[in-house]
Image (spheres, rainbow, N blue to C red):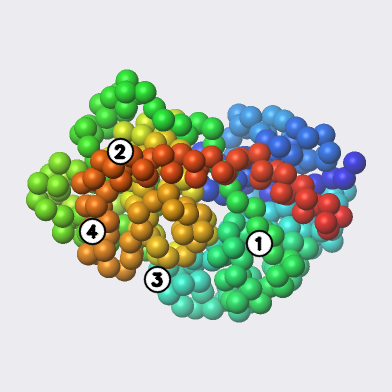
């Protein structure tokens, strides 16, 4: 039986897209019986995660990240006599001699609007990312759009890039009226609100959403305030009446999506963009940026806008919330679109990659 070590540091309490991908992967891989799996963890990962219980686990303390990334992980893989090493990051342990699989889920940090310094972007693009990709037997990304960007920016050979689309977890489903009412009560939300879910990094373009909301007619602004979820403790909204939910618990997300009148996703760049699909799975109509991978991922199941135009964002919001017919159509199409992204396919596709490179 082939052995694989997985860098599982992403299994933290923060519900990132990488964490969700990793949990879906491990759910299939650790129960398949096809591989002997060992999870490499540091001291910060909680041991009470179901996926961890199903796999072998080895912990090593991480004090200096670079040392852990390359020396510690290489040693752990060597001691396990691993055939493969999987990293949910672009970085891989360079001293491990077996087959390495890296993850370039997105390269938004290479764009000028990312907020990352020019010198850091140059180091990553011209040096580190090329070293990691050349050292990898396969590079996983999440969409055709990202695959094309990797080929152009980093000159990664097309046959090395493998696309695995994330899945929408089964917890995301339409909520009952009682669940929605309870959710609104907990967060002091009104009957109608416009929802954004994500962090507040520059490429997420949250300020543009706030400016667009300010362009709406006053009655609409008052009746449909913004709810900004996941933006962190330090985010200060510009929009009067906006509700900030800095770190919503994962279990609240289905009702938070489902109770919203509209979910808006104004991002300038994404590797995939899972939150609009989660909103769709919960029966919420979606308006999204028309750039990057969003048309590829969301198809015709949402209303699109130009994320660099506040007027375009405002017009899209107004079109959806003003028309019952379009809302109903988007809800029906959204439910069908979200159903295409089955979490079980994450492991299935990953297993095919392992068979190719073994």
Q: Distance between the residues labelled 2 and 3?
A: 29 Å
Mark 1 neighbour density, 10 Å: few (under 14) some (14–19) many (20 or more): many
Mark 3 neighbour density, 10 Å: few (under 14) some (14–19) many (20 or more): some
Residue at the spot of label 1? 91
Earlier in the chain: of badge 1 and badge 3, it is: 1
Q: Distance between the residues labelled 2 and 4?
A: 18 Å
Earlier in the chain: of badge 1 and badge 4, it is: 1
Earlier in the chain: of badge 2 and badge 3, it is: 3
Quadrant containing the C terminus in the rendered view = bottom right
Residue at the spot of label 4? 315
From what the image shows, is residue 281 above or below residue 289? above
The answer to which quarter of the image holds residue 19 is top right
Q: Position of residue 351 (x, y in %)?
A: 77, 47
Quadrant containing the N terminus in the rendered view = top right
Front disc: 1 or 4: 4
Left or right of 257, for residue 69: right
In this view, the residue farthest toward the right is 1
Q: Where is residue 355 in the image (x, y as percent from the top left)?
A: 83, 52
Q: Residue at 68% of width from left, 35% of height from top? A: 27
Earlier in the chain: of badge 3 and badge 4, it is: 3
1 and 3 marks in contact (CB < 8 Å): no
């Amino acid at each position: 039986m082939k052995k694989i070590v997985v860098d599982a540091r992403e299994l933290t309490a923060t519900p990132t897209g990488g964490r969700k991908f990793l949990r879906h992967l491990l759910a299939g891989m650790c129960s398949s019986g096809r591989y002997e799996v060992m999870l490499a963890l540091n001291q910060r990962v909680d041991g009470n995660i179901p996926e961890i219980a199903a796999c072998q686990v080895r912990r090593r303390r991480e004090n200096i990240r670079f040392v852990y990334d390359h020396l510690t992980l290489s040693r752990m893989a060597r001691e396990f006599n691993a055939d493969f090493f999987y990293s949910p990051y672009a970085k891989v342990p360079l001293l491990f001699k077996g087959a390495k699989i890296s993850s370039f889920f997105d390269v938004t940090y290479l764009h000028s609007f990312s907020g990352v310094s020019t010198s850091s972007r140059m180091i990553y693009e011209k040096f580190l990312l090329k070293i990691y990709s050349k050292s990898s037997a396969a590079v996983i990304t999440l969409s055709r759009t990202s695959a094309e960007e990797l080929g152009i920016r980093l000159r990664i050979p097309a046959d090395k890039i493998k696309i695995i689309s994330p899945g929408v977890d089964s917890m995301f489903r339409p909520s009952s009226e009682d669940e929605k009412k309870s959710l609104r009560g907990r967060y002091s939300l009104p009957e109608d609100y416009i929802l954004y879910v994500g962090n507040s990094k520059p490429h997420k373009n949250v300020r543009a959403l706030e400016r667009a909301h300010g362009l709406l007619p006053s009655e609409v602004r008052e009746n449909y305030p913004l709810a900004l979820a996941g933006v962190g403790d330090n985010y200060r909204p510009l929009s009067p009446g906006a509700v900030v939910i800095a770190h919503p618990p994962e279990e609240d997300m289905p009702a938070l999506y489902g109770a919203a009148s509209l979910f808006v996703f104004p991002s300038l760049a994404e590797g995939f963009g899972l939150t609009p699909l989660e909103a769709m799975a919960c029966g919420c109509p979606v308006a999204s940026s028309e750039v990057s991978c969003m048309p590829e991922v969301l198809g015709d199941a949402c209303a699109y806008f130009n994320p660099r135009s506040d007027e375009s964002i405002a017009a899209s919001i107004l079109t959806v919330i003003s028309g019952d017919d379009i809302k109903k159509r988007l809800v029906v199409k959204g439910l069908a679109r979200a159903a295409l992204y089955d979490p079980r396919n994450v492991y299935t596709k990953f297993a095919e990659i392992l068979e190719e490179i073994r």
